[in-house]
Every structure is written in C-alpha cells, then in structure tokens.
Image (tube, helix red, strand yellow):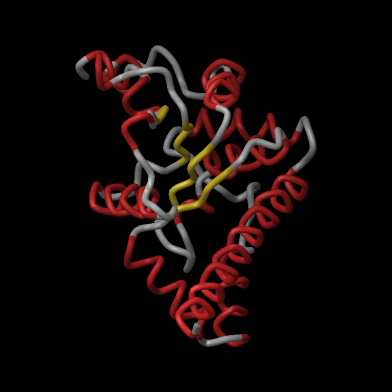
Amino acid sequence: AMVDWIPRPDRRKQTHFMSWTWKYTLGQLHSALEMFKMNTTPPRDTSSIFFYICFFVNNQFRIIVDGVAAGSDDLENSFKVNLSRSGRMVAVLDTWEDPVYLKRVWTVYEQFVACSSRLPVEFVMPDASMASLQDHIRQGERGLKKVTASICKVDSEKAEAWKAEDEKKVKAAIRDSVGFEEVNQHVRNALVDWIGQAVRKQFQELVDAAI
C-alpha cells in the first residue's frame, strides 16, 4: 500500500476518517483540507491530525489490477472498524450544488454509518465552493432554498460505485438493514445541520463585525 512508502514519523495512528470520492481533483482535495485547517479560531494545529484515507491504506494494485478483493468484500473490516477506530469523520464535498459526493454509494453509506453511530462529522469544501455557499446564505431565503434543495437530493438507491460489485454489495447491506429511505433521511439531516451551522457562523461574524 502507498502508506508504506510514507516516512514513519508522518504515518501514525489515525485520528480522523476521511470520507471522499476518487473523482475529486488533487486541487479540490488540497483546498478542502486547507479549509479544514482554518475552520477553527485559532486555526487547527494539524501536527497531531492523521487521516485514514482508503487510497493510501488499501493496496490499490492488488484491488484494481489483480482483482483480488473489492472494497465491499468485508464491510465490517474495510470500513466500519476503521471509522470506529478513528472516532470522527471529515466529509469532503466537492461543492454544495449537485455534489458528486451524494451520487456515490460509498460516501452516502459512510455518512449513514457515521450518523447512526453518533460519531462527529465535519463537512468541508474547497475554498471556491465555500465562498459560493456563503454568497447564497447572504441572499437570505431565496439563496437558502436553493442550497437546501440541492443538498437534499440524496438517493442511495440510485447512487453508483466505480466497481459494480461494490455497488451491489453496499446496496444489499442498506436494503437488508434499515432501507434506502432511512439512509437518505439520515444523510439529509446531517447536511441540513451542517448548513445550519454555516448560517449561524456567518451571522455571528456579521454581529462581531458590527460591534
């Protein structure tokens, strides 16, 4: 796995599980992580933060080229155990407007498990996407309705995965447990809470600026 190439001081026990999709560009991911760092006041000290990122931890050559395993072969070990071990999730969205994140079955499933396990989830986006969200918040009701309509378009039954086998197995896990609509509602609630926090934060900044 690629993590084995990283110097030992730079790979330690995971503190955060990253939920993301492989369709993101490197620039999107880098910008979103910069926003994660700056989301607190003062900015986070990232020297003690270590992400679990499937791309680096799983042996991609054996999965993709040799076809020896699929990410869904053992949901308990490939995902749930690592999420529980991390104890918290950072969900990287590409944008709030028709996000790819909500069209991938893995990320929708990850959100559901995190929410149902009551693990803290922090949403982040690239700088440009966050600026667009803030602009729509400033528009008041009209802007918030557009944002809400977009992020509530969650349909786990129609979500896709790069590997058909993964899509089939993850959807079977959803179908055999609580069902698609329950998963959809969990994810919608998490996203609505996040937007609510963004609105409160922006309002507080306006109040502080006026004092």
Total tally of numbered discs in the picture: 0
Q: Residue at x 40, y 74 (%)?
A: 132
Residue at image location 38% in from the left, 71% down from the top: 131
- Residue 192: image quadrant is bottom right
Instruction: Please tell me whether residue 125 is drawn above or below residue 78 in the rendered image.
Output: below
Q: Nearer the viewer, residue 131 or 209?
A: 209
Q: Nearer the viewer, residue 205 or 75?
A: 205
Position of the N terminus by quadrant:
top left
Measured as percent of width and height from the top left, residue 41 is found at 42, 55
Q: Relative to residue 98, is residue 160 depicted above or below?
A: above
Q: Nearer the viewer, residue 37 or 45?
A: 45
Quadrant for residue 80, please give it.
top right
Residue 188's place in the image compared with 89, above or below, is below
Q: Is 84 placed above or below 23 here?
A: above
- Compared across the picture, whether 126 is left or right of 112 comes to left
Q: Give coordinates of residue 200: x percent, y percent.
A: 60, 69
Identify the residue at image location x=56%, y=15%. 77
Taking the spot 59% from the left edge, 87% from the top edge, the residue there is 142
Tell me: 4 left or right of 133.
left
Image x and y of residue 204, in percent: 55, 73
- Position of 105 with respect to 180 (left or right) is left
